[in-house]
Amino acid sequence: QVQLVESGGGLVQPGGSLRLSCAASGFTLDNYHIGWFRQAPGKEREGVSCIGNSDGNSYYGDSVKGRFTISRDNAKNTVYLQMSSLKPEDPAVYYCAARPTYSGSYYGLCAGQTDVYGMDYWGKGTLVTVSS
């Protein structure tokens, strides 16, 4: 069964940190670009950060630059999002997505380019709440 499962969300105070994990099963991540997205009530889905399949290049949205770090461990078939200095505007459901390399670039994934082949995988999300 092909799955992406997010974990690590929860409640944190402003200025705190969380590490989100995205674990893949049923397929191998080394041929996929990975992205982290978020969506808050009443807002459009936002591309937070994306990383290439093997070259280490990454993209960050302007609102999270300098605070969030994306990384991947292909040996563990897992991608991470380290979040620090969390702000009141960060709460949302966070999703990870995987796009095969033949379907586009990591930058295109975060920019919202179309899933041409209908082969992107999406997790079900993990909730992040920031509150004092």
Image: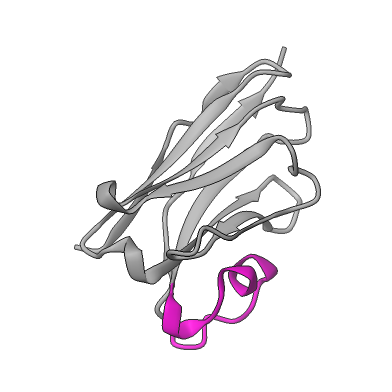
In the image, residue 16 above or below residue 9: above
Given residues 117 and 40, the one toward you in this image is 117
Compare residues 66 and 64 and report the one nearer the observer.
66
Task: Using the image as rendered, state which of residue 114 and residue 101 is in the foreground.
Answer: 101
In the image, residue 52 above or below residue 68: below
The extreme front residue here reads 55
Report the side of 3 relative to 6 (left or right). Answer: left
- Residue 83 appears at what percent x and percent y? 61, 32
Question: What colour scheme has been applied to the protein in the rendered image?
Answer: one colour
The residue shown at (63%, 49%) is 38
- Residue at (55% x, 35% y) in the render: 82
Horizontal side of 93 relative to 126 (left or right) equals right
Q: Is residue 84 in the magenta section?
A: no
Q: Quadrant of the N terminus?
A: bottom left
Q: Residue at x 57, y 21 (%)?
A: 11
**Residue 101 in the image, given as x and y percentages of width and height:** 44, 78
Q: Residue 112: give x, y in percent of width and height.
A: 66, 72
Residue at point 43% right, 85% down? 102
Bounds of the magenta segment = 100-117
Q: Position of residue 77 (x, y in %)?
A: 29, 52
Q: Residue farthest to the bottom?
A: 116
Q: Quadrant of the C terminus?
A: top right
Using the rendered view, name the quadrant where residue 100 is placed: bottom left
Magenta stretch containing residue 108, yes or no?
yes
Q: How many marks?
A: 0
97 relative position to 128: left or right: left
Residue farthest top in this picture? 132
